[in-house]
Image: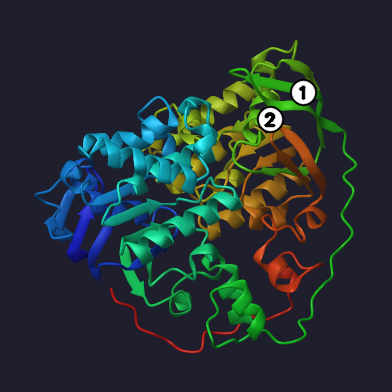
Amino acid sequence: MIDFKRVRFAYPESTSLALRDVDLQIDDGEFVVVGGLSGSGKSTFLRFLNGLVPHFSGGTFGGRVSVAGHDTRHYGPRALSMVTGFVFQDPEAQGVAGTVEEDIAFSMEQLGIDRSIMRKRVEEVLDLFGLAPLRRRSLTTLSGGERQRVALAGAIALHPQLLVLDEPTSQLDPWGADDLIHAISLLNADLGTTVVVAEHRLDRLLPQLSRFAWIDDGDVMLWPDLYCASRAVPEVCLPSIVRLAMRAGIESRPTTVRDLRRTLPDEIPGPRGEAPSIIAGNMAVDVRGLTVRREGRVVLGDIDFSAREGEIVALMGRNGSGKTTLLRSLFGFIPVERGSISVAGLDMRTSPAHELGRRAAYLPQQSRTVLFNGSLREEIRFTMRMRGSITWPEDLIDLLDMQHLLDRDARDLSEGERLRAALLAVLTGSPQVVLLDEPTRGLDGKQKHHLIDLVRALSREGACVVIATHDVELIAMLADRVVLLGDGEIVAEGPTRDVLSGSLAYSTVVNRVFGPGFLTLDDVALELRPAGDTIVPVH
């Protein structure tokens, strides 16, 4: 299905190779998962599979890439769309039609698929992804996760020979992520569709993958599984199941929680939880009776929410539950029908927007929307002027590992690099309140730990941090408190360990394996042991 022969590629005006001497084959019907650090070349590798590289990107290309017998030098994206279904990291940029069902049908219309077949496939994928209630909704009214499900449904409706997904679960709630993995597994097993997925969150994909590709600075190594790849992959980038099995010295290579439970020692020493710390800072965010209505639909209904200085609060809940709407309301981006909002001591009904911008920072899901200057260095200077800061944020730049990217245009960065650039831009000048919407989208395991260090540093300095995310593992390590939203209402809130423990959807892998009292890998007193054998990768 896929054949790379001595492939070398560099983007226009770049002095370094994005891919170097890649030589590999992926057979028809395989399920290959691709990993790598942010900016390592994952998206470049995937975009070879639908012809965007080199036909759209330009650049210097050596070697040969063949997809389903099509030499990509001679067949571009239009021809390869008959073979390859592709979903980008940024699903918001992929929607083209007005409503959900029209957008799903669009690609099939372009390929001339018979109308009766097209209608049947639209119905199938609407049900498969739980999108039937949204079928006539405008794309502009959907949450990021809902937009991602629509993009995935449109790609799968094509019944492609090859399905290529770039971080498909990055904005999905746990149920949506499970539905996605189930859907592409059915395509792979029942229809023989070849699947190539680039992803940082790997636990859900462990049972499905037939091989694992790790990309390191343009070099691609292909391994039989993640256990074999563990010597090449940084430990923080490995899924929790693999890390636990390695720490326990298990040789059977479990891929599910059930398998791991069966093979672990009977007694695992570890802490049984700690009393949650009480945050005693002043009130930084105070919301009372908040109601927000959009297009006649109540998105938030009579919400009471608060957070204190130095507190880290997580907003969690299904796609469309109101997390982003709450964050945008706090920053004054959405009209409020009823209720009061106070942020950093400012009454949002009467305070000017520029004053809020001095005291608070907001990172949206679409990080590119906050980057509008020529370079990252100029973005930092703009924020410094806005907040009246005279101190260059050297520590923040180092913590986010952005020194080498300061003079780059944000449009030339990878998704993970762009997110870090946006974080740097909005956090310059020490805001009192920080609102982050899906801040781990595009981040590898190493960068996620840098983000944790950054948020903890903000908290120690007295900033209030509110994070909307589906990343349960991140919140387990970071948040003081979790607020769980459902259908525009708060359905649960409390200390992180209490809310996440025992949940069917929002518990961590460690909690599902070991039960109450265990939440993170640090709770499990097992030392890392090396994998049992070494298997040489295919380069």
Q: Mark 1: few, some, or many residues within 10 Å (few <14, many ≥20)? A: some
Quadrant of image for the C terminus? bottom left
Q: Considering only vertical position in the picture, is 91 above or below 513?
A: above
Cα–Cα span, label 1 and label 2: 9 Å
Quarter occupied by residue 352: top right
Front position in the image: 2 or 35: 2
Residue 7: x and y, percent?
19, 62
What residue is at 26 percent from the left and 35 percent from the top? 115
**At numbered mark 1, what does the secondary structure look like: helix, strand or loop?**
strand
Q: Considering only vertical position in the picture, is 232 above or below 170?
A: below
Looking at the image, residue 428 sits to the left or right of residue 109; the answer is: right
What residue is at 65 percent from the left and 66 percent from the top? 509
**At numbered mark 2, what does the secondary structure look like: helix, strand or loop?**
helix
Residue 377: x and y, percent?
47, 34
Cβ atoms under marks 1 and 2 closer than 8 Å: yes
Q: Amino acid at mark 2?
A: Leu
Looking at the image, residue 118 sits to the left or right of residue 172; the answer is: left
What residue is at 59 percent from the left and 52 percent from the top? 175
Q: Amino acid at mark 1?
A: Leu
Give the residue at mark 2. Answer: 326
Residue 218: x and y, percent?
31, 61
Quarter occupied by residue 391: top right
Looking at the image, residue 122 sits to the left or right of residue 527; the answer is: left
Give the residue at mark 1. Answer: 290
